[in-house]
Amino acid sequence: MTQQSWHQLSADEALAAQQSGPAGLSAAEAARRLAAHGPNRLTPPKKRGPLLRFLLQFHNVLIYVLLGASVVTGALGHWVDTGVILGVVLINALIGFIQEGKAEKSLDAIRNMLSLHAMVMRDGLRREIAAEGLVPGDIVLLASGDKVPADLRLIGLRNLRIEEAALTGESEPVEKSPDAVAEDVPIGDRTSMAYSGTLVVFGQGRGVVVATGDATEIGRIGKMLADVESVDTPLLKQMAGFGRRLTAAILLLAGFALAFGMLVHGQPAGEMFLAAVGIAVALIPEGLPAIMTITLAIGVQRMAQRNAIIRRMPAVETLGAVTTICSDKTGTLTRNEMTVQRLVTTEKTIAVAGVGYAPHGGFAVDGVDVDAAEFADIARAALLCNDATLHEQDGEWKLEGDPTEGALLTLAFKAGLDARFEAEALPRIDVIPFESEHRFMATLHHDHSGHAFAFIKGAPEQVIGMCAQQRQDGEDRQIDPAFWHAQIEALATAGFRVLALAFATMESGKRELSFDDVKGGFTLLALAGIMDPPREEAIRAVVACHAAGIRVKMITGDHAVTAVAIARVMGLASDDKALIGADIEAMNEAALREAVRDIDVFARASPEHKLRLVQALQAEGEIVAMTGDGVNDAPALKAADVGVAMGLKGTEAAKEAAEMVLADDNFASIAHAVEEGRTVYDNLKKAITFLLPINGGESLSLVIAVLLGLTLPITPVQILWVNMVSSVALAMVLAFEPTEREVMRRRPRPPGEPILSGFLMWRVVLVSGLFMAGIFGMFELALMRGAPIEEARTIAVNTLVAMEVFYLFSVRYLRAQSFTFEGVKGTKPVLIAVFAVFALQLLFTYAPFMETFFHSRPLSFATGLQIVAVGVALLVLLEIEKFLRRRLIVGA
């Protein structure tokens, strides 16, 4: 018997297949089965040890380049620089190690969802045992408030309702039945099953254990989660490719310079080796990993201020690249609070305002407000035929009981009824509880004069059959079933769950309510259309995502009609097309990939379906963010490029599998996070565009010197000073740059776009050439004036730093002009960095002890003015280039 087919067997067949009976197993047989099947707990996966996890943090091409830089500086005897570089590498590794350790808790969270104790039949007697001791064939007894301890085939029940939100994502409790269902129904419709980790909210039941531990439905999800491989973020992929290309370029250029100098100019091998080392050091952007880490960390802080908690730093940038958001419905796009939004009477259809359980909102017909007193009888039926309670706590309305009954209570409160007053005026005398067999609830009430009244609510088809009249214009007239069935169909098509409310006068003094009393003679008052309403802020966030070129898809365990109705309200789908779980099941990968291009609503989706949908979108080249809150979402959350879990109502398993947790469960926070992610990527591009031309200008200066057989204008140790002090300090401030105005009005960048676009490559080549001209020109000019080589090199270093400072003001706006008040003023971090670098260069130039380390020499004030003039000239030339590009190049 497969794990998924127990629901199609009858109760007797399931007992026979498990070789069990109503009295349960004997203690001896249970012990034998425990030895055969093992304890009822999830098997911990094999984990990488802490040492291996730490060492793997160094498995990155950029880190290899950085380690190579430390070897080079160590070989040169510059141990301080070696220590700084290794410190940067170590900080990166520690951050990655800590973040990965948090992600390892994902499976632990699922294991903790198993019940601790279970009530079973052993040797014909009720016994409470540890849930780990359950075996297939055990008879388990369930009561309201219990957590289901294993997967059960139900064999008997009374009014049993189970909340399966953690497994299916749907908050509405499922009415259970011992009757078999079809083999191919989705998990949410397997009413004859109770699954491990779900919660009994009402009634009692008993079932035979059919699966324990890893064989349970929740165990299969845990196995899926363990098998899902985390994906590399676009940034990590781009930086890995960039690092590989940069490493190859460094080795080729340094090797070429070494060979050229020795073979063409006959330079000594030792001297040319130092020149080659200098070129390699010049090309390595030592500060880039640190700047990348700091830029991401600042993004994390900014997102936290906007209720998005990042658990894995590279996910910050990935959010900026997202092209598709796959969202769960219940509790994510919707409020997870059932609400009566429509009332249908014989005369009119009434719109009920307000969402959630808060009793705020009025009534309107065709947009015109109407007096709630008109609906007093309807509201009274909703209030009195009800077992739920609502109370206000810390400004929020809390429900105790069934969500549907909570919606009816809120309706009554909106109509102005007082629960205590009505209960005292018409106290309940008897009740027929709701059961799935008869699909209605009826209550008997007396007024103070002894008159008896009955109220009834339930499935509309059932209640209509019990009614002889309908309330029309304040009078009871013969019921028109065809009219009501048409209204039921219209409400259901619009995505509402429909309940009927009815009323009858009973004989005075009646004390008991029987099924014979409610067979007929009732007056139908109204139909109530109930829906878990969309969040208003989520609707606005969907609009913002569409404006940013991001598609939003709904993947839910709910029925297709309801999903399409919600999607229509939220603007997710322009048509009523939806794919259900059975359709997904029947599709191969190619067909599914084609389907996800056009369809935005997926209903009755199981965990496997959600995972396949995410993977199909990724196969189409999409960068996917997946939102969710249930255990059922965890595998898809982990597989997505960015998993987004709900912080308030989300399960721990979902939070641990996700890269980002929303502290306010607000879908709108995702749009804010995307905005911050795009800002982070923009700032990273600015930092790279700032650093690479500096490194390019340094290396070109050395290459030209080698090719022409001239003296090197800057020594390797001076290059390290510039790269690790001034370059890093100036580039760091770009991480603090504010969001550009049009960031959420442009489409996501293509997933395969290199981090250095054609425009940025041109900018790197142009600025590298200008830096080379400035460095080499000032060096040679100083030599021509008769300056000692140490002074000429000091001039070259200060020229390089001056050009960096003025280039910083240019790179803050890659395409827009920098000669504006905002551009010249800069941000506070920019001004602090400029003054810090100015102070450090004064130290470099004039401090005697710096002369010992770097062979620098003091410069005259006139020379200093010439150096500043070169920096200003660079900024002017780049502004002219921007102007020409805007005017002459289409699309620049």
Image (cartoon, rainbow, N blue to C red):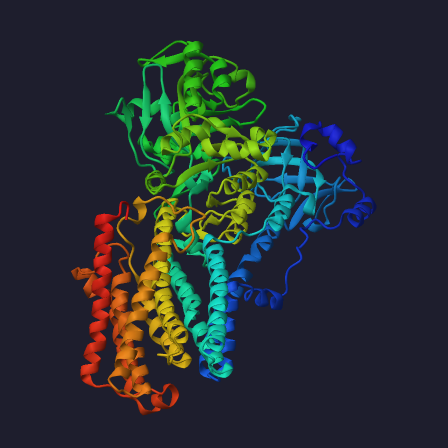
Residue 534 vs residue 653: left or right? left
Name the foreground residue: 297 vs 791.
791
Residue sitting at 50 percent across and 64 percent down? 248
Q: Is residue 641 above or below residue 77?
A: above
Name the foreground residue: 716 vs 360.
716
Residue 857: x %, y % from top left: 30, 88
Residue 289: x %, y % from top left: 44, 66
Q: Is residue 64 above or below residue 116?
A: below
Q: Can the viewer see residue 800 in this picture?
A: no
Residue 533: x %, y % from top left: 39, 34
Residue 53 vs residue 884: left or right? right
Name the foreground residue: 562 vs 770.
770
Quadrant the N terminus occupies: top right
Tell which residue pokes out farthest to the left in this image: 821
Q: Is residue 159 above or below residue 166?
A: above
Tell which residue pokes out farthest to the top in this image: 478
* Quarter holding residue 84: bottom left
**Numbered marks: total:** 0
Name the foreground residue: 795 vs 25.
795
* Quarter holding residue 568: top left
Q: Can the viewer see residue 225 in this picture?
A: yes
Q: Is residue 796 above or below residue 610?
A: below
Residue 520: x %, y % from top left: 49, 13
Residue sitting at 26 percent across and 73 percent down? 802
